Amino acid sequence: MSKIALISGRGRLPHVLADHLQADGRAYVLAEMEGFESLSSTRDDVLRFRLERLVPFLDKLQDMGVTQAVFAGGVHRPRLDPALIDPATMQLLPRIMAAMNRGDDGTLREVIALMGEWGLDVVGAQDICPDLVAPASMLSNVEPKGADKQDAARGFEILRMTGAADVGQGCVVSRGQCLALEALPGTDAMLAHLAELRAGDLALPEGGVFCKAPKPGQDRRIDLPALGPETVLAAHSAGLRGIAFEAGGVLLIDRDEMVARANALGLFLWAREGA
């Protein structure tokens, strides 16, 4: 029987997918890159690997009968230890480094290409667990007002421009002004910084909408943006009125808890058609 490899990074998503694969009775292999532990904190059946020994790792997956792979969780570019690179992986290093120089999107596309050369078909988390994404709808009891809808439209316009430049997948807009833009530190850091600014003396427009969407042209099998219950709490702490995200393009971690928190805090959760 063919197997799927769940290659995990940090966060809750790898645990959600692992539980889903187990409940579905799928044959799977759990793997994670050293330095980005998640599943191994609670499980003892996780295959650990290093980027410096990528080829032996891919060979092992092939030997184990793995034919598909799904990526889940947060990672960033690791520091490579030249002393650990095996000869076979050394042959791939120019390709890997060139891809990294093309930015996140270029790196991810090269990862997908390499997996394919080992007979591994990369699939998206949403393909494994369709309930992770939402169709166009209002998930919360609270609905956006007219000004919120205008801010959301402006936010998605900004994300089309920044996404094309391979910069971030989220921003905050209030009264047409961009108050924050997601960069390498991520969503949590962006919203925490905005909360600090609002607690200080800087005069910022009240309210605002956190907008989230994939980058234009992004390969949606890997690195889709994600939201979870903690995002809702962080948005509330930053004084926002709600969260607007692209329907079908954002992974919702623990959706029921997200909706419950949004309703309790008076925020809207809007799966918006198109970015």
Image (cartoon, grey):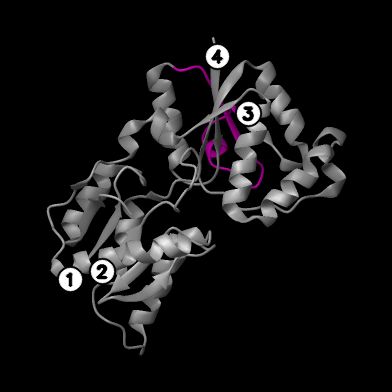
Image quarter in which the C terminus is found? bottom left
Choose between 212 and 109: the one closer to the eye: 109
Q: Amino acid at mark 4?
A: Ser
Name which of mark 1 and mark 4 comes first in the sequence: 4
Q: What residue appears at the point 43 percent right and 32 percent down from the top-left corner?
A: 17
Q: Within 10 Å of the Cα at label 4, are there few (<14), some (14-19), or many (20+) other Cα atoms?
A: few
Choose between 22 and 214: the one closer to the eye: 214
* Mark-to-mark CA distance, 2 and 3: 41 Å
| Labelled pair 3, 4 in contact (Cβ < 8 Å) | no
Q: Amino acid at mark 2?
A: Asp
Q: Within 10 Å of the Cα at label 2, are there few (<14), some (14-19), or many (20+) other Cα atoms?
A: many
| Labelled pair 1, 2 in contact (Cβ < 8 Å) | yes
Tag 2 residue: 151
Q: Amino acid at mark 3?
A: Gly
* Mark-to-mark CA distance, 1 and 2: 6 Å
Name which of mark 3 and mark 4 comes first in the sequence: 4
Name which of mark 3 and mark 1 comes first in the sequence: 3
- What segment carries the magenta color? 26-46
Image quarter in which the N terminus is found? top right
Task: Say the numbered circle drawn on residue 147.
Answer: 1
* Mark-to-mark CA distance, 4 and 2: 47 Å
